[in-house]
Image (cartoon, rainbow, N blue to C red):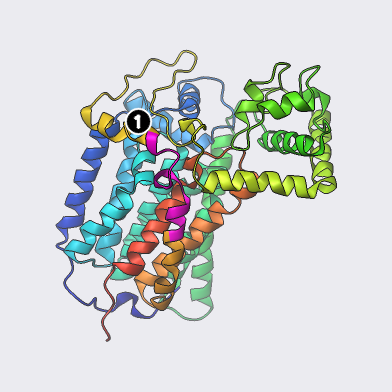
């Protein structure tokens, strides 16, 4: 963190205080017209079924179900939780450009760059935990920047619940929250010295992480069925290694009788587990839907780890193919659902949801399928923009704009890199926050005005 120029006067003329809020309001209205009530994939529909009283599992993060249940009580359907995420996103952008005192042109340009970048614009229309994550972290960035720039400590009280929500919203979100938690701790203890200040910093930094974990445990206590997620990853890794080694390594209880390596190879795709689960003639058992015994899970874990140890090059090649699929361009023959879902997917007894049929929606989504296999809708250009902003951010590291850019990038990469090992699909939404964070870093490093000397 920095204690240098963060509160110094800003060179140039800041935009009128109302301008970022006007732009945010216009953006919110735009999104509501374009996407209401929010696009629902299978995961969204399954979460809503749990919200409505279906048997709960921890496949869907329980906090997402809890928040949606509150929203659903006020207005049935996905609309309110969808709108909540939009409000967090747009308010966060407005707070950030106001805190850094962007000029009028830079404020509008910066908000446009972040919000109307194709990946961010397209993902924002979905009812996904990934969207909730990047919206909550964008709001936290704006609130913490406001607390730092104007010494308005009350904004720490707004940032904290946003960080707690973000940390509990996805099973793997805590690494993304950590840099913001350290920022919060620094703000809590700054302008003080000695042991008491260090204690305040430590408590402030620990609060978002600890409260996120407590919220996850509390919300998860009422889950009816606990489903371990790692068997899905183990099954996919074992399938890839089996094909490379030309030897069936999957335990017999994970595959249908008669399934052999050539059949598995025919159905296997490097970008998702779904094709091999759906397209083999002899079938494969669902790694999340079966009630495996403790003995079977132990055997699966031992087989998985032994296969990686015996065939490390095959395993690394498989994870590299997934990494390229996740971070790179999507193939022409890949399903566009890896990028976006223009649907209101039904699940069991969920009431039907009317799809958005507005002209604006059609205008935005019509070209999306054609662009799904291009760099326009891939993560790598956004991540490169963030990396390109590092030198400017580092030069400004003693100013609020530079330190915020570095914090956002640290959060982005702490969140993105583990996907190379834990992802079981190349869905673009997984990298939604790294894309947003990279753009936030870029506008902070390149568009925010420099502090003037004291």
Residue furthest toward the top? 349
Label 1: element kind? loop
> Percent x, y for residue 199?
53, 71
Q: Is residue 8 magenta?
A: no
Q: Which residues are magenta?
A: 370-384
Which residue is pictured at 19% across the width and 50% down the height?
23
> Percent x, y for residue 449?
26, 72
Asked whether residue 342 appears in the rendered view, the answer is: yes
Of 131 and 360, nearer the camera is 360
Mark 1 surroundings: few (<14), some (14-19) or many (≥20) residues within 10 A? many
Q: Quadrant of residue 171?
A: top right
Residue furthest toward the bottom? 454
Q: Is residue 377 magenta?
A: yes
Residue furthest toward the front? 332
Using the image, determine if residue 400 lies above or below residue 278.
Answer: below
Quadrant containing the N terminus is bottom left
Q: Quadrant of residue 18?
A: bottom left
Quadrant containing the C terminus is bottom left
Which residue is pictured at 25% across the width and 33% down the height?
363
Using the image, determine if residue 389 lies above or below residue 321.
Answer: below
Of 365 and 72, nearer the camera is 365
Q: In the drawing, does residue 331 fall left or right of residue 423?
A: left
> Percent x, y for residue 340?
42, 34
Asked whether residue 153 appears in the rendered view, the answer is: no
> Percent x, y for residue 222?
57, 30
**Residue bearing the label numbered 1:** 38
**Magenta part, dominant SS:** helix
Using the image, determine if residue 222 lies above or below residue 171.
Answer: above
Which residue is pictured at 70% across the width and 22% down the height?
290
């Amino acid at each position: 963190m920095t204690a240098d120029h963060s509160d110094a006067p800003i060179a140039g003329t800041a935009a009128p205080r109302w301008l970022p809020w006007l732009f945010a309001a216009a953006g919110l209205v735009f999104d509501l017209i374009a996407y209401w009530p929010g696009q629902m994939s299978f995961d969204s529909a399954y979460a809503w079924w749990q919200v409505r009283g279906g048997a709960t599992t921890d496949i869907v993060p329980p906090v997402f179900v809890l928040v949606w249940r509150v929203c659903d009580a006020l207005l049935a359907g996905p609309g309110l939780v969808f709108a909540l995420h939009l409000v967090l996103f747009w308010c966060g952008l407005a707070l950030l450009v106001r805190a850094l005192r962007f000029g009028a042109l830079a404020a509008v340009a910066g908000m446009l760059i972040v919000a109307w970048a194709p990946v961010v614009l397209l993902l924002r229309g979905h009812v996904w935990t990934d969207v909730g994550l990047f919206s909550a972290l964008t709001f936290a960035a704006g609130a913490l920047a406001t607390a730092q720039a104007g010494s308005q400590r009350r904004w720490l009280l707004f940032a904290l619940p946003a960080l707690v929500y973000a940390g509990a919203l996805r099973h793997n979100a805590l690494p993304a929250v950590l840099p913001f938690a350290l920022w919060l701790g620094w703000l809590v203890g700054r302008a003080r010295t000695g042991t008491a200040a260090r204690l305040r910093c430590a408590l402030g930094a620990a609060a978002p992480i600890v409260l996120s974990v407590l919220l996850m445990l509390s919300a998860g206590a009422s889950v009816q069925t606990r489903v371990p997620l790692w068997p899905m990853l183990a099954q996919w890794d074992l399938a890839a290694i089996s094909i490379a080694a030309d030897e069936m390594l999957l335990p017999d209880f994970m595959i249908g009788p008669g399934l052999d390596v050539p059949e598995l190879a025919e159905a296997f795709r490097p970008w998702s587990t779904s094709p091999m689960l759906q397209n083999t003639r002899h079938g494969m058992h669902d790694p999340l839907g079966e009630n495996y015994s403790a003995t079977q899970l132990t055997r699966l874990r031992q087989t998985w780890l032994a296969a990686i140890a015996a065939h490390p090059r095959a395993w690394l090649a498989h994870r590299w193919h997934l990494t390229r699929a996740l971070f790179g361009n999507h193939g022409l023959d890949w399903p566009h659902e890896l990028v976006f879902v223009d649907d209101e997917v039904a699940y069991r007894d969920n009431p039907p949801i009317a799809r958005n049929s507005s002209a604006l929606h059609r205008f935005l989504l019509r070209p999306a399928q054609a662009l799904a296999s291009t760099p326009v809708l891939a993560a790598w250009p956004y991540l490169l923009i963030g990396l390109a902003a590092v030198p400017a951010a580092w030069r400004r590291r003693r100013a609020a704009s530079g330190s915020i850019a570095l914090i956002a990038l640290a959060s982005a990469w702490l969140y993105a890199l583990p996907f190379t090992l834990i992802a079981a699909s190349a869905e673009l939404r997984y990298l939604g926050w790294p894309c947003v964070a990279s753009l936030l870093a870029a506008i902070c490093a390149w568009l925010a005005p420099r502090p003037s000397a004291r």
